[in-house]
Amino acid sequence: MPAEIAAIERLLRGGKSSVRRGKVWDQICAETGVGQVVGKEIHFTPEERQRLREYAKAEHGLDPQYDSRAGGRMAMASHNASEKLSPDSVFGELLVLATAGTAHLRVSGENVTTPQGSVLSVRSDCLDAEHFKTQNLVIVENGGLMPYWADIMLPDVFTDSIILYRGHRENVRGVTELVSNQPADKLAWFFDFDPSGQSLALDQGKGSTLVPARWRELGKHTPFNQPKVHRNQSVALKRLKDRADGDLLAIAEHMASEELAVMQEHMVRRNILLSALPLA
């Protein structure tokens, strides 16, 4: 197993949010554009930990967080005397969703919508999977945005959508299953507008990525741009340029010339209208 995968596996399975700096971790961070150096350590947010997991899956075909004991305490109790052996968190298996526009969920046989400012947490086995596929689906990377889903300026084609948090622990399994069954024309991803975020969107292999509709107007002069973050993503920028084409390649080149890195939070808080850019 490559050293990078082993390192990411130890971080994720150990539930850690920081590691000691070293050659392997410096390489991982350069490749993915995640992590904040604090002294002799590198610190990661929950969203960055999820990016590391996706990076390992995309680059090496392995899920570094896989654990045969996964499934939560209830599942563990069915075959072991100590349900507390499960590494899953109490609410970790629940999907976090919201409904925008006229979209709705079918949960345990009932139609469900979410009022502005609220979200729904639900077990994946309670969702009507067939109905789910008929709805537009937008995956949000940053869970902190979920209570503010109504402020996301979705493009017309995704105005009526289910908004789903991408997850960062056990619930990732449920999200992955839903995404695998979702029609590509009804699927969109909302990541940071930076090389790492758009490279990660490209890794998904289906659906569309949501980017600022007027991205050409964003540049070094943009007050909420983070050029320092961009400079830490040189490897991710190269990966994006090597794999992108069409509009996404034009975006990558614009990011490079303007040192662009705009976070999802800023796009939402500043009511930036989004556009859907097909990934395939």
Image (spheres, rainbow, N blue to C red):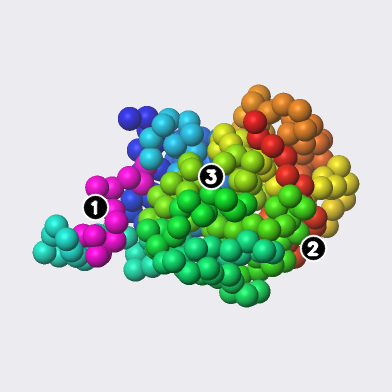
How far across and down, in percent of the image, does residue 10 sit?
34, 46
Q: Quadrant of residue 250?
A: top right
Q: Secondary structure at mark 3?
A: loop
Viewed as shown, does residue 121 lie left or right of 151? left
The outermost residue toward the front is 109
**Can you say whether 122 is above or below 69 in the image?**
below
Query: Do the numbered discs 2 and 3 sit on residues whose CB atoms are within 8 Å?
Result: no
| Residue 69 shows in the view | yes
Residue neighbourhood size for the residue with mark 2, other residues' Cα within 10 Å, grouped as few (<14), some (14–19), many (≥20)? few
Residue holding disc 3: 182
By secondary structure, the bulk of the magenta-drawn segment is best described as loop
Given the image, on which type of amino acid does mark 2 rest? Answer: Arg
N-terminal of the pair, mark 3 or mark 1, is 1
How far across and down, in percent of the image, does residue 181 sit?
48, 43
Q: Secondary structure at mark 2?
A: loop
Q: Tell me where the magenta segment starts and ends, as one range.
A: 64-76
Residue holding disc 1: 69
* Label disc, if present, on residue 270 of the rendered structure: 2
Given the image, on which type of amino acid does mark 3 rest? Answer: Gln
The outermost residue toward the left is 81
- Tell me if residue 208 is in the magenta stretch: no
